[in-house]
């Protein structure tokens, strides 16, 4: 079957769904395609289910920290019950998403989307011609060319494990490995991380990450740093990972190996047939309107677009808002990224927004770096937190915050306050005028600023 549309959207996640619905409500004839269940990564295989599971790890950590300080008795994570609870969030998503599309009159297609020409997408036996096409396909594990690479499971698979293996190796030390490692360790698994760099979570402040590494080891996670994964083999029910450190080979064994060595844009859509030029990171090269530089009929959003922004869900939302305006109003809205906060949901959490210490050293601004461990502050002492610290990068002349980096149980909430302050260029004086409920983590912001002044 061949059919013409005003808009063909590939991908049903945060960006694709928003764009398809907005254009349909504006009177466009819209089709949407996905090779997987409708709804995208975040609510089904990413942020949302991950945080549901991590919540159990956080409570286990509370129990361990407060043992002998008012909490008594045995407690453990029941993996099957936890996974069943997780499914109450994820299983309704595909049906709800597709129902919403159909109620709006959006045509839904399931299958692999491949370009046939600059304006045509083929899905199985259907050929869809789009006056405009949006690629919002998300990301997938990067192909590494390692021997035995296919023996590793991906984050999607980990989130569907019916039983937790006794021993797990996480290859790589990024978000996926660190977050899942903390969950698995507190659920009773023996956990090892093999990472090629000097420290995991390289996007975050090194001093805070060093504290987190110590806390991770206390939780039972073994770190093998400066060690590159070279191959994976399977012998019966056991996996053997071969790695190298300082030109010396090492072997590690486990019941499961998880791929945490990076993700790349999922653009297996025959981009060459669509005259789509890809960038160095594998995303669609776009102009300031998120429009393909080589095919003006095509726009890209979220992980599919090659931009300066990190691959985070809020960026997909930001991109979708811009693409909607540019589709409906003829490239009226250049994309603009404010400071973007980022959080790794380890236990404890680590957050970052704005300028780093390394960037401060290179900056022409007169900056100050303030770092302090704060486990003795009331917020953290009352729960016997073992690792908590902050680092602020400030503009000495303007009296404003340029960057904030936080480790602690409340890092996810605190980092958002600093994101607002940086975005609005609030001075220390203005920030300290804000009255926060006490005693809360936010009420510590004034104390942090006092350490700066």
Image: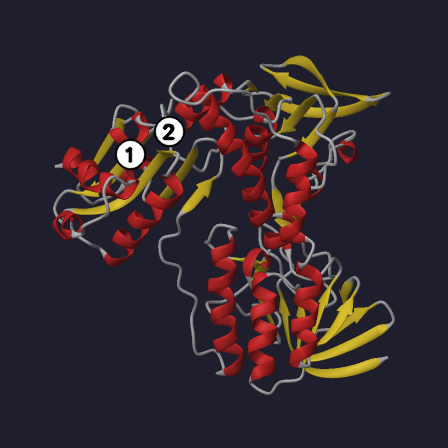
What mark, if any, has residue 414 been given in the picture?
Answer: none
- The residue lying toward the viewer, choosing from 127 and 442, is 442
Rendered position, 447 above or below 277? above
Give the residue furthest to the bottom: 27
Q: What residue is pinned by disc 1?
A: 391
Q: Is residue 354 left or right of residue 333?
A: left
Residue at position x 50%, y 62% in the image: 317
Q: State the image quarter where residue 404 is shown.
A: top left
Q: Are marks 2 and 1 in contact (CB under 8 Å)?
A: yes
Rendered position, 431 above or below 298? above
Separation (CA) of disc 2 from disc 1: 8 Å
Q: Is residue 360 left or right of residue 251?
A: left
> Is any atom of residue 275 visible in this view?
no
Q: Position of residue 349 (x, y in %)?
A: 43, 35
What mark, if any, has residue 208 been given in the picture?
Answer: 2
Label 1: element kind: strand
Residue at position x 48%, y 17% in the image: 218
Q: Quadrant of the C terminus?
A: top left
> Is any atom of residue 10 visible in this view?
yes
Q: Position of residue 408 (x, y in %)?
A: 37, 33
Residue at position x 25%, y 52% in the image: 421
Q: Is residue 85 left or right of residue 376?
A: right
Q: Position of residue 155 (x, y in %)?
A: 66, 40
In terms of sequence position, does the residue under pointer 2 or pointer 1 come before the other?
2
Q: Position of residue 109 (x, y in %)?
A: 77, 70
């Amino acid at each position: 079957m061949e059919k013409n549309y005003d808009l063909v959207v590939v991908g049903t996640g945060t960006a694709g769904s928003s764009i398809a619905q907005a254009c349909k409500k504006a009177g466009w004839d819209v089709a949407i395609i996905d090779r997987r269940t409708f709804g995208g990564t975040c609510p089904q295989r990413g942020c949302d289910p991950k945080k549901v599971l991590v919540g159990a790890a956080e409570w286990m950590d509370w129990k361990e920290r407060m043992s002998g300080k008012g909490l008594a008795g045995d407690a453990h994570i029941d993996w099957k019950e936890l996974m069943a609870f997780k499914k109450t969030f994820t299983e309704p998503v595909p049906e709800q998403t597709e129902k919403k599309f159909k109620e709006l009159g959006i045509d839904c297609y399931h299958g692999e989307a491949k370009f046939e020409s600059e304006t045509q997408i083929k899905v199985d036996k259907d050929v869809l011609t789009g006056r405009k096409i949006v690629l919002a396909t998300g990301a997938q594990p990067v192909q590494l060319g390692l021997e035995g690479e296919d023996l590793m499971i991906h984050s999607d698979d980990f989130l569907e494990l019916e039983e937790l293996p006794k021993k797990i190796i996480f290859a790589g030390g990024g978000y996926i490995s660190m977050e899942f490692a903390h969950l698995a360790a507190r659920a009773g698994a023996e956990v090892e991380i093999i990472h090629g760099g000097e420290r995991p979570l390289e996007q975050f402040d090194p001093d805070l990450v060093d504290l987190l590494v110590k806390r991770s080891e206390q939780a039972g996670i073994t770190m093998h740093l400066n060690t590159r994964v070279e191959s994976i083999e399977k012998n019966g029910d056991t996996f053997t990972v071969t790695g190298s450190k300082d030109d010396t080979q090492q072997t590690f064994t486990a019941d499961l190996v998880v791929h945490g060595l990076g993700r790349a844009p999922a653009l297996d859509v025959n981009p060459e047939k669509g005259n789509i030029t890809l960038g160095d990171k594998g995303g669609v090269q776009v102009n300031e309107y998120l429009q393909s530089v080589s095919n003006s009929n095509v726009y890209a959003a979220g992980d599919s677009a090659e931009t300066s922004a990190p691959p985070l869900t809020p960026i997909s939302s930001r991109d979708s808002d811009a693409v909607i305006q540019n589709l409906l109003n003829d490239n009226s809205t250049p994309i603009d990224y404010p400071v973007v906060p980022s959080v790794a949901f380890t236990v404890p959490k680590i957050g970052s927004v704005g300028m780093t210490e390394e960037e401060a050293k290179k900056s022409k601004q007169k900056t100050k770096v303030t770092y302090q461990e704060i486990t003795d502050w009331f917020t953290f002492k009352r729960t016997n937190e073992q690792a908590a610290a902050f680092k602020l990068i400030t503009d000495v002349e303007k009296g404003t915050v340029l960057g904030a980096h936080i480790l602690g149980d409340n890092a996810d909430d605190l980092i958002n306050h600093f994101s607002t302050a940086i975005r609005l260029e609030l001075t220390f004086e203005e920030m300290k005028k804000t009255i926060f409920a006490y005693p809360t983590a936010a009420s510590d912001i004034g104390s942090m600023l006092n350490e700066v002044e």
